[in-house]
Amino acid sequence: MATLYLVSTPIGNLEDITARAARVLAAVPVILAEDRRVSRTLLLHLNIGTIPEIYHDFNKERVTPRLIERLKSGTDMALITDAGTPGIADPAYNIVRAAIDQGIRIEPIPGPVACIAALSASGLPTDRFVFENFLPNKGAARRRVLASFTEERRTVVLYESPHRIVKVLEDMEAIFGALWMVIAREMTKIHEEFLRGSPRQLLDHFAVHPPRGEMVVLFNPRIRCEPLEKEMPAAQ
Ligand code: SAM
């Protein structure tokens, strides 16, 4: 019986690959990756010539049984996703669950994960938090999920896209008013920035600087804006 390694990879800056991740990726005969182009950049950086097999949301159900058979017959595999830790908002769960059911050994190789990097630098309470992943696409469902946090005492962490962030901020302003929130954008990359302020201040910012790049949204309904009003620079 082989091992399925869940290898965390950088969320932008290639220097964030760990020594252990590099060693495992170089050693395994099979690398499963979400996207060949994305993984190629990392593997080239590590000087690893293995051509990854594709494991993504659209083939995971079809290919998992065969991959499990190969693991059972002794082929070690490393699973990487486009960024960060496999299983966090990406397709890894499916094969992890199937491997557990078949008694296959699973070994996480820990490393970057966007929600934790964002939380640690957010300035919001980190002692207790809830990760809500991506909000629903449809407006009514999205507002329902956001409204379910009005009594929440833990810090809430969401993944968001630049195309939807304005709608999300409008919903948040309507539901929470002037809470003090944080958007962690493009972490570990050249344009990394942490935007802090009320939903309205962030909307004003994006009206001048159109939203771009990858983002994590964080808020805690108990942390309000008033004493921190000056935090967000006025849009120029
Ligand atoms: N498995 C990944 C992890 O460990 O964080 C998350 C994969 S999920 C498909 C991608 C989302 O993570 C992006 O839409 C964004 O919300 C967030 N994300 C990933 N990299 C990021 C970065 N460098 N800066 C900010 N957010 C990032």
Image: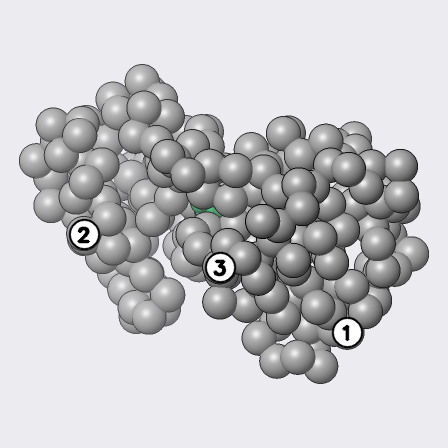
Horizontal side, residue 163 vs residue 130: left or right: left
Whole-percent x, y for residue 61 in the image: 36, 68
Q: Amino acid at mark 2?
A: Arg
Mark 1 neighbour class, 10 Å CA radius: few under 14, some 14 to 19, many 20 or more: some
Q: Secondary structure at mark 1?
A: helix
Q: Nearer the viewer, residue 152 or 215?
A: 215
| Camera-side mark, 2 or 3 | 3
Q: Amino acid at mark 3?
A: Pro
Residue located beneath label 2 in the image = 37
Spot the residue most to the top.
19
Residue depicted at x 25% and y 55%: 35
| Camera-side mark, 1 or 3 | 3
Whole-percent x, y for residue 132 in the image: 66, 56
Label 2 to label 3, Cα distance in Å? 27 Å
Look at the numbered disc 2 and say if its residue's Cβ is closer than 8 Å to ligand 1: no
Q: Secondary structure at mark 3?
A: loop
Against 212, residue 6 (above or below) is above
Look at the numbered disc 3 and say if its residue's Cβ is closer than 8 Å to ligand 1: no
Residue located beneath label 3 in the image = 210
Residue located beneath label 1 in the image = 144
Looking at the rendered image, the quarter that the N terminus falls into is top left
Sequence-wise, the earlier of marks 1 and 3 is 1
Residue depicted at x 70% and y 68%: 170
**Tags 2 and 1 in contact by the CB under 8 Å rule?**
no
